Image (tube, grey):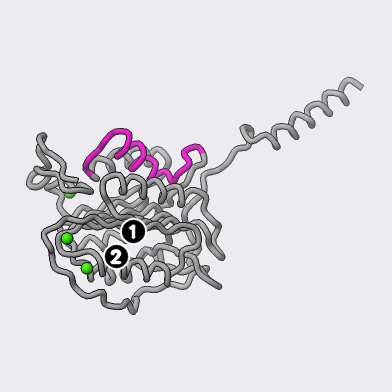
Amino acid sequence: MRIQLIVISMLLLALICIHTPIFRFRLPKLRAADPNSVEVITSWEFPNPGSQPADGVVEKYALVVGVTDYTLNPDLEYTDDDAYSWADYLESIGYEVKLLTGYVDASTLERELYFLLETEDGDDYVAFIFAGHGVNFFFLYSAIVLSGWPLDTAISQYALKDIFSYADSKHIFFFFDACQIGGMSTLVTSSERYAAMASDMIHTAIEDSSLGHGAFTYFFLIEGIIRSDYKYMEQAFDYAYDECKKRSMNPTEADGDPESYFALYPVSGSGGGGGGDFFYEIK
Ligand SMILES: [Ca+2]
Ligand SMILES: [Ca+2]
Ligand SMILES: [Ca+2]
């Protein structure tokens, strides 16, 4: 009788644990897509947005994408939160932001990329932020994964590189919080471009319910740029790199100019030899 009581109470306790959120052990979700579940676009018939020369005014434009809804790949929970946080921050430093979250397909991205490239001119600042699934193909190239039907759509590093070759702005920031996305370093074609990526071409990127974000976005943006007030992307990257390494990730950066710091707004003294101690900000 006593043994039966003990067994029953243990079973009850187990049931309570299973149904109580704090006892539920949740594994971090991977932002990796299955290469067989996507239609991949390696070259894109992208309409020419024309060329807009510098007009003497530094305007700042950002396209921020957080894909949560996928057809064949698992939905993601925190990519939209990553995108909201980036959008809020970029707006706070004077960017005109276009935010795409939820179901974001290739035609939506094409429309917004076209609008961005048709708007920015030769002396503007541009930022492209992506949080979602990533995938590599044969360890040869990376792709971002968008929503799509009947297959999700993967846009390769080559297709994105072609599209950004239309940019008039020289100063472009790329940020990718996705798995196997390191091939996007190919977008850094000049000294005034900088890319931060949550992974190399092999490693995965995670999103974690305890952070409420992708780990890379959390440490780069929330703890690095916002809480630690890092002005330079290289500083934010170094911080996020150390934190993500503890989580078995391997973030990578592509720095068009290793001799100078890269900032998201004009910072006087940031050029030539690693940035000065004295600078003022033009917003
Ligand atoms: Ca301008
Ligand atoms: Ca343009
Ligand atoms: Ca640099």
- Left or right of 54 in this view: 113: right
Front residue of 75 and 58: 58
Measured from the top left, where is residue 204 in percent x and y?
Answer: 43, 52
Residue type, mark 1 in image: Leu
Measured from the top left, where is residue 60 in percent x and y?
Answer: 24, 55
Front residue of 99 and 141: 99
Magenta residues span: 210-232
For the question of whether residue 220 can be seen, the reply is: yes
Measured from the top left, where is residue 93 in percent x and y?
Answer: 26, 45
Name the residue that disc number 1 marks. Answer: 63
Residue type, mark 2 in image: Leu
Residue 231 is drawn in which quadrant? top left
For mark 2, give the secondary structure.
helix
Measured from the top left, where is residue 206 in percent x and y?
Answer: 46, 47
Binning the other alpha carbons within 10 Å of mark 2 as few (below 14), some (14 to 19) or many (20 upward) gives: many
Numbered circles on residues, count: 2
- Left or right of 120 in this view: 29: right
Q: Are marks 1 and 2 in contact (CB under 8 Å)?
A: yes
Q: Quadrant of the N terminus?
A: top right
Residue that appears at 11% across and 34% down: 277
Name the residue that disc number 2 marks. Answer: 116
Ligand 1 falls in which quarter? bottom left
Front residue of 156 and 230: 230
For the question of whether residue 201 can be seen, the reply is: no
Residue that appears at 21% across and 43% down: 232
